[in-house]
Image (spheres, helix red, strand yellow):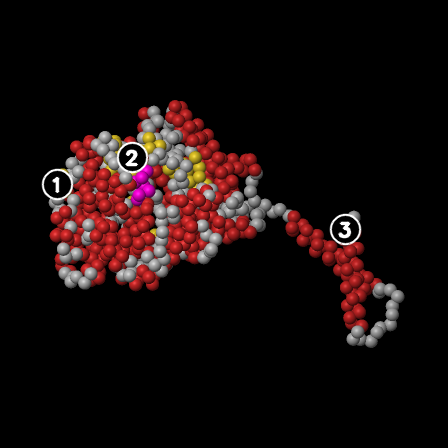
Amino acid sequence: MPLDCCSQEIRRWVMGKSESQMDITEMNTPKPKKRLGWSGLEIGLAVVAVLLAVVAITMIALYATYDDGVCKTPDCIKSAARMLENMDPSARPCQDFYQYACGGWLKRNVIPETSSRYSNFDILRDELEVVLKDVLDTPSTNDIPAVQKAKTLYRSCVNETAIDSRGGRPLISLLPNVSEWPVATTDWDTSYGTAWTAEAAIAQLNSRYGKKVLINFFVGTDDKNSTAHIIHIDQPGLGLPSRDYYECTGAYQEACSAYVDFMISVAKLILQERNISVNENEISAQMRRVMDLEKEIANATTKSEDRNDPLLLYNKMTLAQLQKNFSLEINQKVFNWSEFINAIMSTVQINVDNTEHVIVYDPDYLLKLRSILVKYSSRDLQNYMTWRFVMDLVNSLSREYKDTRNAFRKALYGTTSESAVWRRCANYVNGNMENAVGRLYVEEAFAGDSKHVVEEMIADIRDVFIKTLDELSWMDAETKKRAEQKAIAIRERIGYPDEIVTDDNKLNSEYQELNYKEDEYFENIIQNLVFTQKKRLKKLREKVDKDEWISGAAVVNAFYSASRNQIVFPAGILQPPFFSASQPKSLNYGGIGMVIGHEITHGFDDNGRNFNENGDLVDWWTEESARNFKELSQCMVNQYGNFSWDLAGGQNLSGINTLGENIADNGGVRQAYKAYENFVRKHGKEKLLPGLDMNHKQLFFLNFAQVWCGTYRPEYAVNSIKTDVHSPGKFRVLGSLQNSPEFSEAFSCTTKDNMDPAKKCRVW
């Protein structure tokens, strides 16, 4: 028997050890009289020793094989520790689940001085930036040309010595290419003003550098024919975050003042570097005139709440009709739309005639623009346009130029210092050479087994969405059938495009026109602007490549494209707490699973629902189903619109601006939870996490909530509440879970609790 066998072996080991020790002892002590056998006491002690050893080995064997239902793998222990650390167990989950899930995180984390907000998302991005720094910093003689260029661009960006030694000269040398900056010269009226035309001035900023001022001209996908590109005309962006800021009162007063001071400071530096005397009163007067103009432009733009229906935005017409419908007068001349558009497109050898179709996204803006432009001189307009170009480039110049932005940055974001140079540079290179940098990131940090696991999760969650359609009493059979067709047609992109790693020639070809210099960072930036804009403009005569990825690999985010009917999960987001092949599936479904459901639901939110399975803007809904959708959506508009955000001075969220994201959040949580239930039915229950007295249904919701742990600076909260289409993390958690019966069941909440209101909103 095993026990006997083991006992015999242990006894021999004990006896042998005793004899050996005896031999050693004998070398130092008188040799005792030889005995023929063991005494009774010695035999008894030996038996006891053997029995103790047997018991110890048995206990070890039992402990090693004992299953107490708790997962003790390193990944489970790390997951449990992370979740416990983030929690506030003193909070009541049914009263404020965000505080319960994130109270520990909020107490432990302080927003860095360089950041406008701080969250688990931002921590992941910080960690990704460290990886990018390492790979971009590492010299290698084996790098392919595309990667070499990315590293050269990075080195030029972190070369502060070279940047500071050049002052503002690189920018000053560029100004003549954009009709100069009148406030920073003495002879603009005679050297540029006499020949100035609005068509050329607006076009050169757009065609050369992609800067869209006064009129937003761009080439994009035709919403109603998603395989083709078409010219778009839209309202422009603004120097301040949103049109609301131009009220210049209350929370916006400091931002307006800092904005004008920013303009004045940069103009003074350029004048000083040009050895031109500085007349502060004159500079101030011209820049305040610029601010007056931009206020009027801002007021003419349409509020974001009124730009949510893509069918209303789509106004297709010929160039001839554009000229007739939207006649502008600038500098006492009728604005020639054909001349303007051809001035842009001629840079890529494309000619357009009066039969060319364009889409006007915002007719009201163009109608209002006419009465604004007649009030301002060519000098005023050029001062404004050049300023909008210059303000984007200040951070690429020497320290004294960068410092002119400090008060402006503080007013908008609340930050008192810039992020580390290497962080800004890693992000800049990633943003401009996403495939070259993506290759480096994937080779360094991406686990290859992730892709297959995420593919299975997408299939499971898509299946849940399709089956959930049967539950929807508000949607008729015809519309359900079309919704199912669209869901089936959604194409996924996971991790990264294979060719960035496998096809060196293709990657090198993508960047073959770029040639960077390590000591000319500013020129490298300009080269990128020119390169990117040419690539965009050339697409006018090209078919849409629907296999093209809409995101790089080194990105902590996920995306849905309505015109491609495509969901994308870059390599950067496929990491804890969102995902790990080794962490419990409840956490994966509460993390990346919810994100998958969120992106799928975007295909059916207030915007995505207007596009069919091919990505074309088509009304595929019956009138009754569309009406019901709007009624159910209004429930969420009201719910989220009633959330008051203390960090934003007590302002309420915009339930309209955030509707699409809120619909996606609610649908994502519901679908991911049901998919996890299906997983458990198929594979059985998972082991519990150590130290957490919670089942996996509860852990699903806890991990979902902890993804959104974070906080904002008040200045950025004021900014975000007007510009971000996402609800703040706190309200993403509270809003979604207040609408979830499954959450209430998991935590035994009742209708008396804040997290389980009697009225719940549901669309999908």
Q: Quadrant of the C terminus?
A: top left
Q: Quick one: label 3 or label 1, which is nearer the N terminus?
A: 3
Which dot, 3 or 1, sits closer to the camera? 1
Instruction: Magenta stretch: give its range.
Output: 533-540
Q: Amino acid at mark 1?
A: Lys
Estimate how packed mark 2 is, as few (under 14), some (14 to 19) or many (20 or more) residues with alpha carbons within 10 Å. Answer: many
Residue 598 seen in the current view = no
> In the drawing, does residue 600 fall left or right of residue 447?
left
> In the drawing, does residue 304 fall left or right of residue 513?
left
**Residue 658 in magenta stretch:** no
Q: Amino acid at mark 2?
A: Ile
Residue occupied by mark 3: 3
Q: Amino acid at mark 3?
A: Leu
Residue furthest to the top in view is 478
Residue 246 seen in the current view = yes
Residue 406 image point, x, y percent: 27, 58
Q: Quick one: label 3 or label 2, which is nearer the N terminus?
A: 3
* Residue 466 position by quadrant: top left
Q: CA distance from mark 3 to mark 2?
A: 83 Å
Residue occupied by mark 1: 333
The residue at 31%/48% (across/down) is: 529
Which dot, 3 or 2, sits closer to the camera? 2
Q: CA distance from mark 3 to mark 1?
A: 105 Å
The residue at 49%/38% (across/down) is: 455
* Residue 642 position by quadrant: top left
The residue at 32%/38% (across/down) is: 539
Estimate how packed mark 1 is, as few (under 14), some (14 to 19) or many (20 or more) residues with alpha carbons within 10 Å. Answer: few
Residue occupied by mark 2: 230
Q: Residue 154 shows which numbered tag?
A: none
Give the vertical position of 289 relative to 593 (above or below): below
